[in-house]
Image: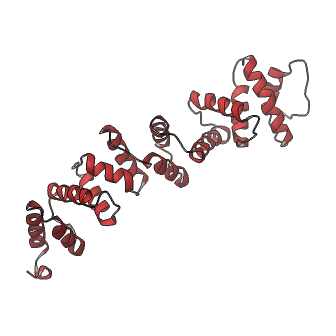
Amino acid sequence: MIKKVLTRQERAGVCDTLIRNNYMEEAYKMIRDFGAEEISTKQLHKLCTEMILKNLFCEDGLLLHLAYTAFLEEENDSVLLDYLCEHYNGLSSQMYRILLQGVSLHVETYDLEERLSAQMMFSGDTLRLDKVFHLYQSRKEPGESIVKAYFTIKCTDYFMNEKEPEEWVFSYLEGIIQTAAQKGRFPTIYLLALTRYYSQLPAIDEEQKELLKSMVSLLLEERLVFPYYKKNWQSIWPCQRISWIRP
């Protein structure tokens, strides 16, 4: 049969027949040559599942496209989702949808949380970043660079744009700065965000006062001075007056 002379509808019928009779490689070659238009989603899903298993989950651009097409039509199972989670890269909204479905069906998500977190931060598409990062943190051991980038964004949004983060962000900052105090390895924006946060609290405890002293000292060494320091200064050195910080 010369498939080129067939209409699109006729080729779709032939392809459906091939899939129904388990001639998967022939059907896949036909789709590669002529496209998958008008092939039923159910048959496409069957083809994808069989080809994924046959290829031992090896990455294939066309197969990924077909699998995502089936996924959009709600024709998904653990095999298809496992394959998408391992290999699919697309828009953040597309990857987010795959991630949520993968988590819901308890399939292995591989490094999808990390890839998606990095993509969201790099592209500035941070609308769902908190949700993705929480999933990442709760399910995997987060990479140091991803964690640092995430908290740098949260601190910058708070310090520069006055976007209040969740309370646990400041608890994390306290822990990481205390742990890294001897190493001196953390972004300056962490210090700025936490000292500003302390300045807005009605009171801080003794442990926070000690941490505040070290943070203010480090910031002064970098010649970073802001009006809110006055409140900080009164908390840690109440008997000393300062006149060098402009209101």
Q: Residue at x 31, y 60 (%)?
A: 64
Image position, residue 141 (x, y; %): 51, 40
Image position, residue 243 (x, y; %): 91, 30
**Would you place residue 66 above or below residue 167 in this image?**
below
**Would you place residue 64 above or below residue 112 in this image?**
below
Q: Quadrant of the N terminus?
A: bottom left
- Horizontally, residue 155 falls left or right of residue 92, namely right
Image position, residue 52 (x, y; %): 26, 58
Image position, residue 216 (x, y; %): 81, 32
Residue nearest the viewer, comparing 26 with 208: 26
Residue nearest the viewer, comparing 64 with 74: 64
**Would you place residue 244 above or below residue 121 in this image?**
above
* Colour scheme shown: secondary structure
- Horizontally, residue 64 falls left or right of residue 158, namely left
Q: Quadrant of residue 194?
A: top right
Q: Quadrant of residue 154?
A: top right
Residue nearest the viewer, comparing 28 with 90: 28
